[in-house]
Image (cartoon, grey):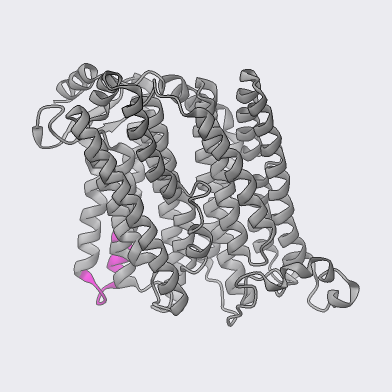
Amino acid sequence: MTALVPLLVTLPLLGAGIALIFGRRRRRVQVGVSIVTLTVAAAVAAVLLYYVDVSGMPLAVSVGGWPIPFGIVLYVDRLAALLVLVSSIVLLAVLLFSVGQGAADGDEETPVSIFHPSYLILAAGIFNAFIAGDLFNLYVGFEILLVASYVLITLGSTESRIRTGVVYIVVSLVSSILFLAAIAAIYGALGTVNMAQLADRMGELPDEVQLVLHLMLLLAFSIKAAVFPLSFWLPDSYPTAPAPVTAVFAGLLTKVGVYAMIRTETQIFRENDVNQLLLIVALATMVVGILGAVAQAELKRILSFTLVSHIGYMVFGLAIATPESLGATIYYMVHHIVVQTTLFLAVGLVERRAGSTSILKVKGLMKAAPVLAVLYFIPAINLGGLPPFSGFIGKYALFNAAAEVGTPIMYALIVAGIVTSLLTLLALMRAWNLAFWREEEDHTEESGVVDRISYLGDAPAAGVQTERRVIPRIMTASTAGMVAVTVALTLFAGPLYNLCASIGAALPYPVSLTQLQDEVNDGN
């Protein structure tokens, strides 16, 4: 079974190489290679998740046969396997969406010869980050996905994409430098970067030194996860990218940062508590992010700000630091990866159908495109947390875990979380009302509807207008498939939440170096 673990990284890299070889001359081969690669990766992740869940034993592989802790260790437990499986499903759905877009538009939005190799390298970086067993390999995973994202975010080479891409690159490089500096400092202090060994040795350092190392890593990961006030770059960077790129970035890239925070908080710095700081940061992230969403008139920017806001829920659950809250956080991560990606795909369809994503300009979509109306509405109310959807389940579990702690700041965060959820519904349903329910011939300016939201008239990017384009069936089908997955998160919430609860119960008790060595020896 351990032989499957390296495939999660090698398969996408191999697929990227094959796709690059074929280049422009055989685009269908590129598409086929990409689809097969991600399908096999999803199957491998599903097998690994089943194995580690049933056996209760994580899998570890020492790359190149080097003894632990000197070699690179790939480590798959329930958490890593679950996130790799969800990520591969999302990546596959977005890939199919991009194939439809590419077939309809040619190279205008997603140049095939560049897109497919970069996309598979992005997948390899994400998977590598999730199964990394040491900090440096986690850094390598970040860099792999960031290098690919630099290419993807500037596809099309328009002025706005180059400008926002430069901001994204600069911010990412600053985060990477901080991360690398923290790794160097940790290695200098403890002589290792293996997470299992760091868990054993971190207690040897004075509390002040632990705090400095802790805050360095948190700062680097908070930039990557778009935690306030380090989230300034995201709302301007994501909306300008092509629709499939924006969707996969919104669903996955920030969650890799959250995942890194979960690993380091629960495994490396168990005795160095900064939970009060994290609670304050979570509160600010939720509130500031959703206030930004309410002030937007462009659908992609609304979703970008809600993305920032809902990262606050995950930081909130992490900061509560109980097994129940950690399980709820994992469930909410899975929910948010799927729902946020789905919403961006739906907005991509809106842009093609209406020629704009400004809620002041788009109207009449309920009658013109009823299927599209459903594809937007279901994930929108899910993200807003209406029962019985997965968004409600995840938020309720977080609030319940906070109420069990019962401190004043916990109750303040519960109130903030409820307000954030209501404002999320306000922002998304206002967009629904204006873009879908308004009739084409309804002169709402005279009726005063738009006058009541005239403050949105100067919102960024509200005036962008493009030509209306046909929506290929594969784009609608891939979005509908993702909507089905969001519904499945509710229908199968029991088994999924039980899995997440078992992950949360295990996280405060990380594997020791001796156990890791035994697992590698058993695998060999």
Quick check: 221 left or right of 397?
Answer: left
Quick check: 385 left or right of 206?
Answer: right
The part of the chain drawn in magenta is 22-33
The residue sitting at 58% across, 63% down in the picture is 300
- Dividing the picture into quadrants, the one containing residue 270 is top left
Q: Is residue 17 above or below residue 76?
A: below
- Dividing the picture into quadrants, the one containing residue 332 is top right
Nearer-the-camera pick, 375 or 244: 244
Quick check: 385 left or right of 498?
Answer: right
The residue sitting at 23% across, 28% down in the picture is 60
Expressed as whole percent of the image width and height from the top left, the position of residue 323 reads 50, 21
Q: Main secondary structure of the magenta part?
A: helix
Nearer-the-camera pick, 96 or 111: 111
Confirm whether residue 442 shows in the render.
no
The residue sitting at 21% across, 30% down in the picture is 189
Expressed as whole percent of the image width and height from the top left, the position of residue 46 reads 37, 37
The stretch drawn in magenta includes residue 322: no
Q: Is residue 473 above or below residue 61?
A: below
Q: Quadrant of the C terminus?
A: top left
Confirm whether residue 341 shows in the render.
yes
- Dividing the picture into quadrants, the one containing residue 48 is top left
